Image: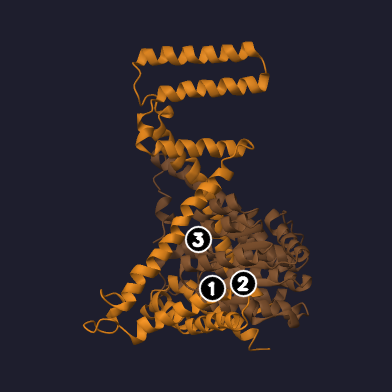
Chain colours: A orange, B brown
Amino acid sequence: MIWKRQIPILIATVIGFATLFGWFIDHPGIESFVNDDATQWYDILASFAIFLGALNLMKLQGKKVFKQQSGWQYSLFAIGGFFFAIVAGFIYKGNDAVEWGVHVTSKGTLFKWMFDYMFTPLSATMFALLAFFVASASYRAFRVRNLEATLLLVSGIIIMVGRVPLGSSISSWFIMYLMVLIVSIAVNIKLKDKKITFSTFLGGVLIVTIWGSSLGWPIDQPGLFYLPILQDWIYNNPNVAGARAIMIGIGLGIFATSIRYILGIEKSYIGE
Amino acid sequence: MLKDKEFWLVAGGISLAFIIYWLSGYPLFKEERIVMFLVIVIMSANLIYYTRFARRGGEIFLRAIPGLKAVEEAVGRSTEMGKSVLYVPGIMDMDQVETVAGVIILGHVSKMTSRYETSLNVPVSRSIVMKAARETVREAYTMEGRPDLFQDDMVHYITDDQFAYAAGVNGIMVREKPAACLYMGKFFAESLILAETGNSIGAIQIAGTASQSQIPFFVTACDYTLIGEEFFAASAYLSQTPELMGGLKGQDMMKAGVTTAILISLLMRILFDLGLIKWNIISILTVQ
């Protein structure tokens, strides 16, 4: 039991304290441990652990093929791809003029060919799918269901339009007329009175027209309604404020979790 | 956990040792980092205080977190439908605290799946995560008295590559159609690819991450999302262990402290800019 409980907790505590307080100690040995050695230990362990992963992958895919479980044909591709990569990496270079080692990045080798014409296009395909997923996710997020979703929709439109060249060609006066229309619709929905709605609309249009005529209709004045400035304000103020609030919570969460580990309060990782 | 007398003896001993060290000229200590050091000590003391407070039976209020309440509901739904639970612990290695938190939550989820006799599928993208997650699941099944239900292949490795992993997990989703998909860990661009595919198969989806840029994607595509600190609170919430719940209270007190410090710093900076005080608080708050 001591090997499965106390020793792992002791290792976590000692290494945790060493790396945490090592940051405050001005000693080359400790600094080197914190900045280099500890991470290198991890990298060495991870390098050896890759064999476990590869074996597990082959075991599962092989089992699927031998037992002809559903979708076993896909496993043939996984196994074939695995052995092809090993051959290209360790057995056959495909270009005798290139040394072993650099062959993985040199032109004319089998490994480089595999990387450029198989791996990269496949990865790019997966990444490109993101564009369609963003579109479908945005459609759901931007549906006007409640006040929050409406705010999201309006902010999203302002940011998107304000960041493209078209946005800087839209006069702030046009946005103001648009706002008069939106306010009038809101008034109509809320009060359901045609006279008040018409008065609001007419009053708004008159105010904007008189104001615009007196200033000579400058495209970017008043700045509050000019889309490039407005999107910049939304991006740098409400957005950053919300993001920082989340960041503070995340930072404290990480700190509390780490301290719980170092002090041995959190022992879930050993199954307790 | 130490008893009260032992605790105060240890705490007093450490404090005394530090005072002696400080009075002797604090050799090797990076003086410019003293503020950060004190903040860490105060925050740690606060966490220890509330952990001990909870352990002594102090009352801790834990607000309901819908995403965590839904975990059991998701496992129950999978059981009713006779389908598996898919658990994705992120794409990073065990050196990331989010992955560690994800593996801890996996322990709680696997306890539920063992109780309900529901199959669990955990595809991982790092070999060390595979070993850690497998041991966690094995322990959970053993503790629930169902080691017979545990199989090594529940936790399996796919690949280290980000998009190849996303393709592999998507394949599992489309072929096996799990009733519940849980994403708990560190994610990057693949978050939306996974969550949208899960959405398309009609699975109940719960995500938890501290990857700030991925939170909007999960909020959009998943039924429940644990945002930032909620994700780190999951272990305490699911286990209901007093020590861990006390830690949450300590975390909240730290947040109150940080908020107060921000407001005081803002005020002092305004006074400095107006020339009413000559001391710039930013000079001591900047990490050296």
Image quadrant in which you'd find residue A211: top left
Q: Is residue A196 visible?
A: yes
Vertical side of B258 occupied by A98: above or below: below
Amino acid carrying label 3: it is Glu
Dot 1: what SS? helix
Residue A242 lies, in percent from the top left, at 53, 46
Whether label 1 touches label 3, CB < 8 Å: no
Residue displayed at 41% across by 56% down: B286
Q: Chain of mark 2?
A: B
- Marks 1, 2: nearer the viewer: 1
Does label 3 lie on the same chain as label 1? no
The front one of B218 and A15 is B218
The front one of A152 and A40 is A152
Q: Chain of mark 3?
A: B
Whether label 1 touches label 2, CB < 8 Å: no
For label 2, count other residues whose C-alpha is less than 10 Å away and answer few (under 14), some (14-19) or many (20+).
Answer: many
Q: Is residue A260 visible?
A: no
Instruction: Tell whether B277 sits left or right of A256.
Output: left
Position of the C terminus of chain A by quadrant: bottom right
Dot 2: what SS? strand
Residue B147 lies, in percent from the top left, at 74, 82
Residue under label 3? B190
Amino acid carrying label 2: it is Val
Residue under label 2? B122
Q: Chain of mark 1?
A: A
For label 3, count other residues whose C-alpha is less than 10 Å away and answer few (under 14), some (14-19) or many (20+).
Answer: many
Q: Earlier in the sequence, mark 3 or mark 2?
A: 2
Residue under label 1? A74
Does label 2 lie on the same chain as label 1? no
Whole-angstrom CA distance, mark 1 to mark 2, is 19 Å
Whole-angstrom CA distance, mark 1 to mark 3, is 21 Å
Amino acid carrying label 1: it is Tyr
